[in-house]
Image (tube, rainbow, N blue to C red):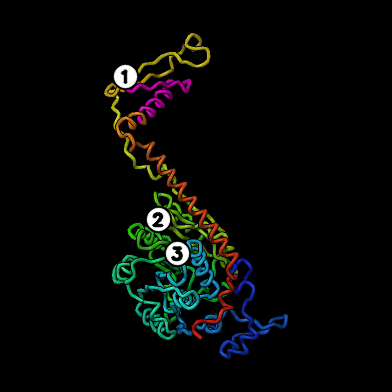
Amino acid sequence: MSFNKTMHDRNPYKKNPPNFTALAREYPELRKHCFITNRGTLNLNFADSEAVRILTLVLLRKDFGLTIELPHNSLVPRVPQRLNYLLFLEDLLLANGLKNSDVTGIDVGTGCSCIYPLMGAAKFRWKFVATEIDETSIKMAKSNVEKNGQTENITVMCPRESTILTEAVNAALCEGFTFSMCNPPFYDFEESSRKYSMDENNACENTVTEGGRPAPRSATVARLNELATEGGEVAFVLRMIEESMELRTRIRLFTSMVGIKASVQKIERVLKTIGDVRYVVSTLDQGRTQRFVLAWTYDNDAILMYMLLRSSAVLRQVRWISTRQKLKNYVFPEIRKEDCEQKYVSGWGPGGQKVNTAQNAVMLRHLPTGIVVKVHEHRLLPKNIDIAFERLKFALDRHVNGENCYEEQFKRLEKEREARTNRKRQKHRLRKQEQTTEPSNAGVLDEEPSGK
C-alpha cells in the first residue's frame, strides 16, 4: 500500500500519506507491526498481511469514523485505492449536476467489509444497495453496516438468480439508480492458482513467484472467490454490459474497475459493437499499482468528459455514437436490376464528348419511377456503375419515403446532436461558474467523519 502524487487530486493521501509515527503512538495494535528504517523513520511492514489489515482498520477508524470487522483470511481493501474509485464516481456526478443527497448506487460484490457503501455513505451521504453471493460475507457486511449506524442508507442483499445487476434492480424499492460500481475478481481460476498459494485455512496469499521475480512488496491474503471467477474479469464485466442493455433506463451510469490492461482492450472491442452506448476508460493510480475504471451509459444527456476538469485521472477514450451508426439498420427500398435500364456513353468532362470518346459514363434509368441518374466520376466503367446504383438508392428512397427517407432522418438527428452538445456546453459553463463561487472542496479526510 504505497502513496504517490498521481492519485486523484482530492484524495487526501496524495499530499498527506499516513504518519506511521503518530499512528503507532495512537494505536498500539499497529505499533508492533512498525519498524525503524535506516533513515531513522518509522515505517510499516507491508510484507506482513496482518500489518496491512490493521492499517486498513486504523485508517477507516481515524479518517472516516468507521469501525468494521475484517477476517484474517479475507481480502483487505486498500483505503487509498477505494477512495480513488469513489472520487472518480463523484466526478461523474458533479459533471451531471447530481447532488450527493439524491444519489443511490449499486455495489456489486461488496465483500465482507462492505467498504464502498460504508465510505460512500459516511463521506458523501450516498445510499447503496450492496450485493454479495457469499453467505459468510453477507453476514459480516450486514454486521458492519449495523455497527456503523448505516442501515437506513445501505441495504445488503444476496441475489438468488444468476444475474449480476438485474435482480438487485428489480428488488429495490427506489425507481432507479444513479450508478453501479464493481470491483470484480481479476483472474480466472487457472491464473489465480499460478499467482497465489493456498494455506491450510483455504486462504490465498500472493507469495508465488514467476520467472525469478520477487514476491510483491505488499502482502495480499484473500479467499478464492475474492480473487477468481469463471472467465476472469473480462467475462464478468461483459455479463454486466449485456445486462445493462436491458437496464439502460434503470441505471444512469454503469461503472466497473478493471485490473489488467489487456482486459480493457477486450472489453472495448465489445463496447464498440453496441450502437447506442458511450463509454470512458480512466486510470486509478495509487502507489505502484495502477487500475482502470470503465464507465458507460445509454443516456444521451449524461456527461462523461467533464470529469477532466475535476480529476487528475488520465482519460483513455470516450466513444461518441455517430449519426450514421444510429441509422446503420435503416432499410432502403429494393432496387431490382431488371427494373433498371443502363446506357454507356462518352464522358462529359473537359472537351466534351468529342474529346472524351471512351464510353465510360453511365446513364441509369429506374423504369417504374422514371428516375434517371448520370455518373461520370471515374475513368473505369465498373466504378461509375457502382456509384450510379448508390445514387439511385438514395434518389429512390427520397421518392418513396419523402420526409422519412434516410437523408432527412440524418439531418434531423444531426440537429438534435448539435442541440445536445450545446446543452452540455452550457452545463459545463454553469458548473465552472459554480466552482468559482463555491468554497473549494476540501480533502475528504480533512472533514469531520460523520460517524463521530
The answer to which quarter of the image holds residue 384 is top left
Determine which of the numbered discs, if any, sits on residue 341 in the image. 1
**Quick one: which residue is furthest to the top in this view?**
354
| Residue 391 on image: x %, y % | 39, 28
* Residue at 48% over, 50% down: 421
Magenta stretch in the rendered image? 370-393
Q: Which amino acid lies under the numbered mark 1 shown in the image of this protein?
A: Glu
Q: Is residue 91 magenta?
A: no
Give the residue pinned by disc 2. 298
330 lies above or below 62: above
Q: Is residue 169 visible?
A: yes
Q: CA distance from mark 1 to mark 2?
A: 46 Å
Q: Which amino acid lies under the numbered mark 3 shown in the image of this protein?
A: Ser
Crowdedness of circle 1 by 10 Å Cα count: few (<14), some, many (20+)?
A: few
Give the residue pinned by disc 3. 256
80 lies above or below 409: below
First-in-chain label (1 vs 2): 2
**Foreground tag (1 vs 3):** 1
